[in-house]
Amino acid sequence: DADVTQTPRNRITKTGKRIMLECSQTKGHDRMYWYRQDPGLGLRLIYYSFDVKDINKGEISDGYSVSRQAQAKFSLSLESAIPNQTALYFCATSAQTGHLPPTSDDEQYFGPGTRLTVT
Amino acid sequence: ILNVEQSPQSLHVQEGDSTNFTCSFPSSNFYALHWYRWETAKSPEALFVMTLNGDEKKKGRISATLNTKEGYSYLYIKGSQPEDSATYLCASGSARQLTFGSGTQLTVLP
């Protein structure tokens, strides 16, 4: 079974609808991230969380909100979807603690992605 | 937000050729440099996490070097194979988050 899962994998929704993307992980990592990917651009960070009580805005948080329901679950919501939120969304986790010097164990593990289309 | 740039944007090589691409990042306050391999219809997967100036890492036919003083990293692929076709992403990190480049899309022609 995959360590990082995302649901749904594909979603088409209409402008103005509320939609939630869910991410679950079995890696036991404290850190979780939501990214979006648009053609020609790299992965851009939307929100990140270091534990259930520590949630932070990323580069492009406007129009999005998140919820960290448990260590294993991190959900991304679009309160009122708009067409320019059409993108591929990835959830990721990391064992990084930030309290120690960086190590080769700080890699991020990505889910399979959710392709969202807003019409 | 860090400015992480990758070049070239895309690259076509013949099977058996060796190739390399570049990632440049701000050299001030360097923390870590990540390389990821992203195949079409799959998720990005980590190749290397590099932390020290002069680091060299190798995984099979793929290797990477790091120069934190001048702010660049090279990824090398020796004897490219069609299965190496993918987008290669680099990311420069802080203790809190990564900033990704836009990637180099490699196509290896049989």
Image: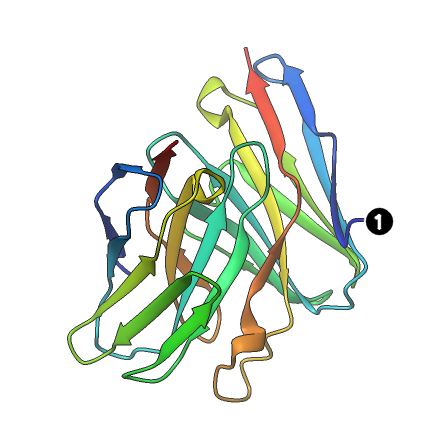
Residue A54 appears in the rendering: no
How packed mark 1 is, by other alpha carbons closer than 10 Å (few <14, some 14-19, many 20 or more), is few
Q: How many marks?
A: 1
Residue annotated with mark 1:
A1
**Subunit of mark 1?**
A
Residue A69 lies, with reference to residue B104, above or below; the image says: below
The residue under the point 66% across, 40% down is A112
Task: Inspect the image, locate mark 1, and give the three-letter code of the amino acid beneath it.
Answer: Asp
Q: Position of residue B62 (x, y in %)?
A: 41, 61
The residue under the point 42% across, 32% down is A38
Q: Quadrant of the C terminus of chain B?
A: top left
Q: Please, what secondary structure does the residue beneath circle 1 have?
A: loop
Residue B64 lies, with reference to residue A64, above or below; the image says: below
- Nearest the viewer among B84 and B91 is B84
Task: Give the residue furthest to the left.
Answer: B70
Horizontal side of B108 relative to A52 (left or right) equals left
Residue B2 occupies quadrant = bottom left
Residue B27 lies, with reference to residue A19, above or below; the image says: below
Q: Quadrant of the N terminus of chain B?
A: bottom left
Q: Position of residue B69 (x, y in %)?
A: 18, 80
- Nearest the viewer among B85 and B96 is B85
The residue under the point 41% across, 42% down is B87
What's the colour scheme? Answer: rainbow
Q: Position of residue B19 (x, y in %)?
A: 27, 51
